[in-house]
Amino acid sequence: MFKRISDRLFIAKQKSFLQKELKRLEEQYKVTRKFPEYGTSEDENVQELETFQENLSLQKNIKNLIRDTKKALSKIEKGTYGFCEECKQPIEQGRLKAYPAADLCVTCASKKYTSSSRK
């Protein structure tokens, strides 16, 4: 029984963190979508373009984090949070604390990374 209570508390903390993180990421995404306007000189135009290109990379990363965070919140609602999508075993709590949106256990994640880096 103690395990179930501590699991529920852990999941409640994770949900709260993920909800706050989702808001933060969505705000960050909005910031990266604004085109910078530094001025009209050639140097300023170059700087605007560089900042815009940097923001495009950030946008892609932030969109992926938003997707993963929403997916984790959905799993909490469905009662499937914390289980590996590959082997269906529980994901280590340490991994979930480090990356709350994790959907693979360490073993499956390392297999996936190893196989994708060989290609």
Image (spheres, rainbow, N blue to C red):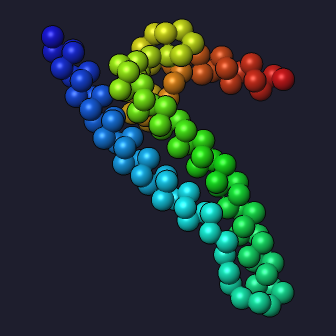
Point 28% across, 36% down: residue: 13
* In this rendering, position of residue 26 left or right of residue 111: left
Q: Position of residue 47 (x, y in %)?
A: 75, 77
Q: Quadrant of residue 114?
A: top right
Point 49% across, 9% down: residue: 88
Quarter of the image with the C terminus in it: top right
Front residue of 11 and 119: 11
Front residue of 90 and 81: 81
* In this rendering, position of residue 84 left or right of residue 50: left
Quarter of the image with the N terminus in it: top left
Q: Position of residue 95 (x, y in %)?
A: 45, 28
Q: Residue furthest left?
A: 1
Above or below residue 66? Residue 88 is above
Q: Is residue 99 visible?
A: no
* In this rendering, position of residue 66 left or right of residue 73: right
Point 42% across, 29% down: residue: 74
